[in-house]
Amino acid sequence: MSRLSKIQDAFQRFLLTGDSTISSHVVGTQRVPVETRLGIYGDGYRSRLIEALQNSFPVLAELLGEADFQAMAAGYVNAHESTFFNIRWYGDRLADFLAGDPEYSRAPILAEMARWEWAMAGAFDAADAEPIDIGAFAAIAPEDWAGLQFEWSPSVQVVGVEWNVPQLWKAVTEGGDRPEPAVAPARYLIWRRELQIYFRALSDEEASVVAAARDGHRGAGHSFGELCVLLCEHLDESEASQHAAGFLRGWVESGLLVGVVSQRED
């Protein structure tokens, strides 16, 4: 390891763990001693990480308030060093941190809000993909429909909540009246179309087929025929096929699908 590499490694250890080995490589003055110089960098590094958390979790920051959020974020920074080249992804374990902390876990809506905001940010930053339209199905023969699989937009996410987090997030974001925290178990679909983020609640039936339709290889999961069979657990056979067709139409109209794959091509 070169001398420069050793200095860089020592500086990194100082930032991440407080190791003072780097002190021997820093020149201090009477006015600005070594400890002060290093403290400027150390404090600046942690402040930048806290700022990144505030950018990724603005509603959580609003709910906690400036002082409490700063204290919470400092605790997270102390517990989790940054392992990403892009600071945007720092904060991926904040929801788990809040859920596992003795103090913050007493308000479980905080961990859920962090998980919700992380999913929203993930949808916004997901890779671009051109959605298909209804014309993509025009040439498909009736006998081939059962074998169709669907490729989903990279932005699509499903988030389960136990509290009224989506409503609270919407009220804070739009400056409306905030609802009181309330238990409201549901699963939500989150996605981006162009530069707009959308979300909506899923029925139990649609949640089960969305999970099955996304769980597979090549970005595609269960076939359309298999989704119809799955729906038979909730509905009778005639209703199942109608519901599956209705779900598919809604997915296409919302821009959730970016491709359709025929199992005959495998």
Image: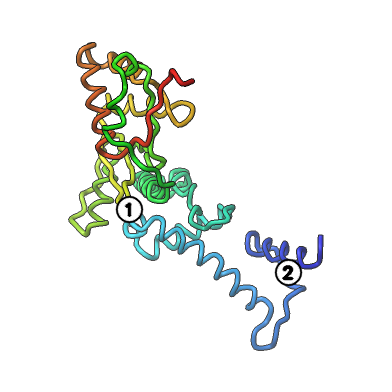
Residue beneath the point at 43% across and 44% down: 99
Secondary structure beneath dot 1 equals loop
Q: Which residue is mark 2?
A: 22
Residue at point 72% right, 76% down? 26
**Of marks 1 and 2, the one in the foreground:** 1
Task: Using the image as rendered, state which of residue 141 and residue 200 is in the foreground.
Answer: 141
Counting the numbered discs, the total is: 2
Position in image of residue 134 (x %, y %): 26, 32
Which residue of the protein is positioned furthest toward the top in this rendering? 237
Q: Neighbour class for label 2 at 10 Å: few (<14), some, many (≥20)?
A: many
Q: Position of residue 6 (x, y in %)?
A: 77, 64
Whether 24 is drawn above or below 69: the answer is below
Residue at 32% from the left image edge and 60% from the top image edge:
62
Crowding at mark 1 (Cα within 10 Å: few <14, some 14-19, many 20+): few
Q: Which residue is mark 1?
A: 195
Residue 107 shows in this picture: no
Q: Give me the residue at 24% from left, 37% from top.
A: 253
Q: Are marks 1 and 2 in contact (CB under 8 Å)?
A: no
Q: Is residue 7 above or below residue 137?
A: below
Please state which of residues 226 and 137 is positioned toward the viewer in this rendering.
137
